[in-house]
Amino acid sequence: MSNEGYVTADGRKIGGTVMEMKNITLRFGGVKAITDISFDIKQGEIRAIIGPNGAGKSSMLNVISGFYVPQEGEVWYKGSRRPQMRPYEVAQQGIARTFQNIALFEGMTVLDNVMTGRLNHMKTGLFSQAIWKGKAEQEEVANREVVEKVIDFLEIQAIRKTPVSRLPYGLKKRVELARALAAEPSILLLDEPMAGMNVEEKEDMSRFILDVNDEFGTTICLIEHDMGVVMDLSDRVVVMDYGKKIGDGSPDEVRNNQAVIDAYLGVSHD
Amino acid sequence: MFYREAGDFKTTYKDDNQTFPIKFDRYRYYFVLFVAFALIPFMLNDYWVNAIFMPFLIYSIAAIGLNILVGYCGQVSLGTGGFMAVGAYACYKFMTGIDIWLGGVQYALPPINIFFSVILAGLVTAIVGALFGLPSLRIKGFYLAVATLAAQFFLVWLFNKWEWAYNFSASGQINAPERGIFGVNVTGPNVDAWAKYLFCLVILTICAVVARNLTRGSVGRKWMAIRDMDIAAEIIGVNPLKAKLSAFAVSSFFIGISGALFFSVYLGAVEVGEAFGINKSFLVLFMVIIGGLGSIFGSFAGAAFLVLLPVLLKNVLVGGLGWPTDLAAHLEFLIVGALIIAFLIAEPHGLAQLWRVAKEKLRLWPFPH
């Protein structure tokens, strides 16, 4: 795999490799969830991982975010091999993610939830926090400004002070995206950002994802089931089936790949 | 009518972050502070201080401490009594001067001022609390509660057996010597009611402000993130070890302070099993649950409810209705218990939630929407 960038169909310039997965194998006991998969994520692109149910897409995302430790293979991040890390250390390196089933903090308001995305940028100690006036307050206000920009961007100003538990599903998904964005990640992982949404909500979410990529230049890696959405949004697609990689390339290449067609439409075995 | 946020425009994030964003609330808060600091000290007598204000102020500190752990960080603890004992005994040692033998040589620290003794006792308890918080990294919920029971029983046992802790006194009790601040006694047999009251009130005010500051900033958000969903918290970059242990430490700090005051200012003489037994752990936990988990105001409300209600009932039953004392004492338990159940059925999230709902209604009143 080359380390060079490329130019997308719509003329955006994509940079060099940010993250590279090399021969990842993940086993749960006797079950092989991922078998010898390699792919890379380049600076500024929207990279999709697709595949039928149980293909190992979410496991792949969990490997990237440090939640699962693969038995074999290496994860390379920003030019160096990533040692084994706890998930919070991975997050501190600038990788943020959302979850397939929403993982917001239900007892907190939208604002507080999005503010938790800034925790890696807030460094004042316990003591100055206790005094509050001065350092802690300045830090809080400075980070609040960043958070407010994200809130404006995702158009959730009106629900800022609403407890998350009172929100409908679609908005929760958006708040979760806001929390991940607030961290100003270098790679944003989205696990099925459009699951369970209606057409309109999907359109909104697609627009947000494109805008995020466009405006902040955030590298995005997403898993999605809706083929139309994936093909429209992403620059390059990895296709997985039964834990193996069966295709990798631009949406058009993938669409015409015989192995992919077989995996999705089924193939007769006689 | 005047309980409105309409028209009160916030132009900075600092203003928006205030503890009391509504003007009326803010003035009410200043008014309460004024009454507590400037009026009540002149109207006190010994009965009021010993029956109502001392327990209320001191249990409020303990409830704030436990609320940080249980309400904000979601780690259940039944070790409160034990941690209060650590605070009490540490305070006793600091008040009387610590003596240590190292290699056959005795090093003696002079007695430390009572205010700093109380704060230092809090710090010692914070360290002990963090140690007993270590199991929380592996176990959760009810199982953690049972693990913290070990702290309760171990600490009570320790202070029964460890003679150095009670200065080798024959009775095994600790007695607060006469100590003061700015020339006014706050511990010992000759203390004015107002001095005790003000001393505890000042410490409670500091504790409440610190607790509020900690819970509204990044530390508090880490705790709440761990409480609401620990896996997601870890994925967004919260170190669970640091977050849980800091919650245990801060919580124990407050609980230690309350234990120190309970011994030195309120009771004056303490026998560990009696004063800091498992009952105390449950009492403070009930205060937190009845008051409202995850709310500083709830800690006050819970403490007030469980301290004031028995006193009120006693006055009504014995003083008002003229019932015999023993009958009233038993009925008191019944009524308090029934009221707790009634309150929790009406509002499982505690008095703080009732208060919140009332405020939300007030904001709109007299209009329905």
Image (cartoon, rainbow, N blue to C red):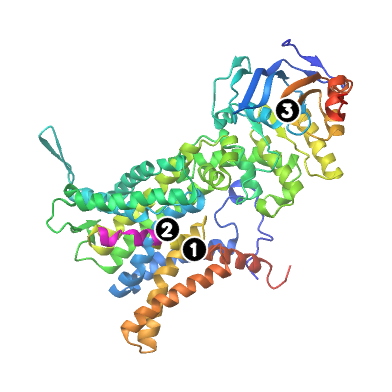
Looking at numbered disc 2 in the image, what kind of residue is underneath it? Ala
Quadrant containing the N terminus of chain A in the rendered view: top right
Residue at 49 percent across and 64 percent down: it is B290
Density class for disc 3 (Cα within 10 Å; few <14, some 14-19, many ≥20) is: many
Density class for disc 2 (Cα within 10 Å; few <14, some 14-19, many ≥20) is: many
Residue marked by disc 2? B63
Letter of the chain that mark 2 sits on in the rendering: B
Nearest the camera: B218 or A261?
A261
Q: Residue A5 lies in what quarter of the image?
A: top right
Density class for disc 1 (Cα within 10 Å; few <14, some 14-19, many ≥20) is: many
Looking at numbered disc 1 in the image, what kind of residue is underneath it? Gly
Coordinates of residue B142 in the picture (x, y in percent): 47, 52
Work out whether A3 lies above or below A268: above
Residue marked by disc 3? A221
Magenta stretch, residue numbers: B273-282
Coordinates of residue A262 in the picture (x, y in percent): 86, 25
